[in-house]
Amino acid sequence: IMNITPLFAIAILLPSITSNQRIQYGIPLSLMLFKDVFLGFHGLMIPVYGCMAIFVLLGRHISNSITATFLGVLIWHVVVNFAVWYSYGGNLLQTYIQAVPFDFNLLVSTLICVMIGKLCIKYYSHYLYY
């Protein structure tokens, strides 16, 4: 699965930019679909897209985007790695343990993207006219 860190950051931050739920869910999910059209569809699309929707939901209901990021990546870790185990077999605990380095990188890079996005929103939101 391609690095989707900026998409997670967009999903968390869009609710702070617009109250339109179609935009909040539509943009991140459309970008995921666009990515998959070019990079290839995969067997884990349902849990991955579900986690993307959860990131939007967290951005809508948790005012602290850092907390939303931590919680979102934790949910991602549990859901997607369970789906990996369910699809490909093996030891569930081992699947979760082997995913920690990847999901830690996902957490750090998503936090960086969220912080950069928050700075952009803070300093450039007065240019939004919609």
Image: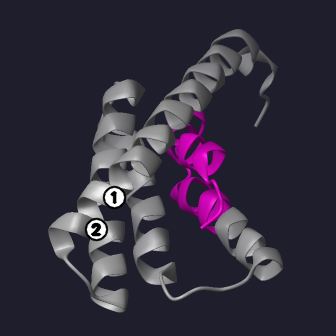
- The residue positioned 49% from the left and 44% from the top of the image is 106
In this view, the residue in front, 85 or 107, is 85
Left or right, residue 37 beside residue 48: right
Q: Residues within 10 Å of mark 2 (few under 14, many from 20)?
A: some
Residue 80 at x, y percent in the picture: 36, 69
- Dot 2 corresponds to which residue? 95
Residue 13 numbered mark, or none? none
> Eyeballing the image, is 69 above or below 124?
below
Q: Quadrant of the C terminus?
A: top right
Residue 25 at x, y percent in the picture: 54, 61
Q: Amino acid at mark 2?
A: Thr
- The residue positioned 49% from the left and 39% from the top of the image is 105
Left or right, residue 46 beside residue 68: right
- Dot 1 corresponds to which residue? 98
> Which range is magenta?
1-29
Q: Quadrant of the N terminus?
A: bottom right
Quarter of the image for residue 78 reads bottom left
Alpha carbons under labels 1 and 2: distance apart: 5 Å
Q: Secondary structure at mark 1?
A: helix
Residues at discs 1 and 2 in contact (Cβ within 8 Å): yes
Q: Is residue 78 visible?
A: no
Q: Is residue 27 visible?
A: yes
Residue 45 at x, y percent in the picture: 51, 80
